[in-house]
Amino acid sequence: MIVLTVVGLLFACRNEAGSRRVHAERPATAPGSRPNLLILIGDDHGGGTLGIDGDPRQATPRLDALARRGVRFDRAYCNSPVCTASRQSLLTGRLPHAVGVTRLEDRLPDDAVTLGTWLGDLGYETAAIGKMHFNGRSRHGFAERIDLEDWRDHMRARPPQGIGPRRPWRPFVDPAAEWLNAACRSAGLPESAMEATFFADKAIEFLRRQREQPFALVVGFYEPHAPFKFPREWEGRYRPEQFDVPEVSEADRHDQPRVFASLTADDVRGIQAAYYTSLAFVDHEVGRILDALDASGKAEDTLVVYLGDNGYLRGQHGRFEKHCFYEPAVRVPLVFRWPGRLPEGRRIDELVELVDVLPTVLRLFDLPQPPGLQGRDLASLLTGASGAAGRDVVFSEYLENEEAMVRSKRYKLIVGTGNRLRKDGYQTGHPLPGPYERLYNLEADPAETTDLGGGPDLTSVRAELRRRLYERLVSTREGLPPIPPGLSEIDAIRWCLVPRERRP
């Protein structure tokens, strides 16, 4: 372990705009002796889809190789099943409601302390390439920022040959089979012109630079998110007839967002084929970046982290989305590799959250942590220290639908207000249900087909999980309006699930 001596204390100051910004004094060690960081993020990459996890499609040979040389978590969970909230929670080490980003369109506050802010202040060369979902113009501490507009400029300057007008992606306007790519069409571009290729190229250029200081590079792909883009050369990689149609119960049909009701069995197979082709393409681009890291001579000094920002249902419960708390929507891949520093081939079954990633990285690097982190340091779990344990429950929230979940190793509790007219396009078409609690026994019912409801045999289980949900919500509300006095535990939970603006 590289030990860094920190000189000085953390201090707060105000920038020219008057917003709060927290800084760290730089370590006293020589910059060249500090480790590097590479974080790679797949978009809607659900847990259990790695070949090394036993997925029969074997779409991820490069990620499988990464996992064999590192540590992978079998039960890692996003803190919100939506891209924006999950990514900003990851980059700040704070829960979505605490950082003020709980819905797709929310903008990360300019004064939020991110991984880029903190490591930049500690002397790292920082870059964020690809999808970050900041929803604003701020770079949020990253010295270099490259995204879709840069790719578009590149395409205008170097248009590929033989490309006609591209089909626009119009979710909730076109039929679901169209915007979910049930026809399993390519993006109509050669591999060399794809967004993911461009981002990987820029990441490779970054890794090839000569530098004296350590680097922190975050690369966010837009795949395998719908419409599950892949280049022309990848057509036919997976075919619809290779896939089965998940069973959908009458209860699933009742709760199914109506946007999916028109999908046929052939559509379901085609969407899965498109998803896995796009996933295989992402895996290929990840491999190119890892090859460049190896070629740079920096691999031994670089912690690599791969994760999915949230999961994705691929026909289970009649859905093709996240935006809910079924296991495929919230469980994600999470892999750490650091040659010589972390064990190879270690597989961890403990419960962990994505909000734990930032404090874990800082602990592994022996760097100071910004105040207010709400994740848990997993370093002892990664290294295999005796007695190390993960979380006994994990937490996730989706305030667009005013609901949240906690799950233990055995049970999952979902609490919702049932009073919000959601604006994300996934309405069921039924009247609002009003307040609800749903309880699943994940050991006996891993597919979550049976809501155990209010049965008296599980009163103590519901009470304990409800208490844990309450504690997590009320203990992480710095900067948010206080909970009104006199509310019961369950009413306080539901009050917290209503999206609220942070106080200035």
Image: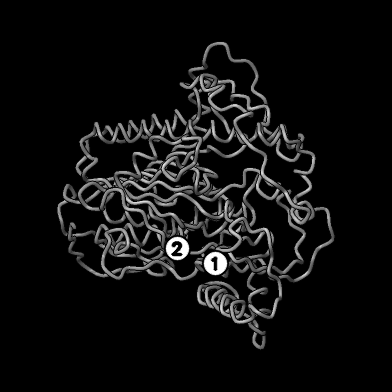
Image quarter for residue 122?
bottom left
Q: Is residue 388 left or right of residue 464?
A: left
| Residue under numbered circle 2 | 351
Say if mark 2 contacts mark 1, CB within 8 Å: yes
Vertical placement of residue 408 versus 428, above or below? below
Question: Mark 2: which secondary structure?
Answer: strand
Per the image, label 1 sits on a secondary structure element best described as strand
Q: Position of residue 211 (x, y in %)?
A: 22, 39
User: 474 left or right of 379?
Assistant: right
Please tell me whether residue 163 is drawn above or below residue 85 in the rendered image: above
Question: Split into 4 quadrants, where in the image is the N terminus?
Answer: bottom left
Residue 429 % position (x, y): 83, 53
Instruction: Give the alpha-carbon distance from disc 2 to disc 1, as whole Å.
Output: 9 Å
- The answer to whether 192 is drawn above or below residue 451 in the figure is above
Where's the C terminus, which quadrant?
Answer: bottom right
Amino acid residing under circle 1:
Arg
What residue sits 48% from the left and 22% below the top? 191
- Vertical position of residue 3 compared to residue 286: above or below: below
First of labels 2, 1 by sequence position: 2
Q: Residue at x 45, y 63 (%)?
A: 351
Residue 300, image x, y percentages: 21, 43
In the displayed structure, does residue 465 sit left or right of residue 345? right
The residue positioned farthest toward the top in the image shown: 162
User: Residue 116's x, y, as percent?
Assistant: 38, 52
Front-lying residue, 132 or 237: 237
Q: Of all residues shown, which one is farthest toward the front?
A: 444
Residue at the disc numbered 1: 407
Q: Residues within 10 Å of mark 1 (few under 14, many from 20)?
A: many
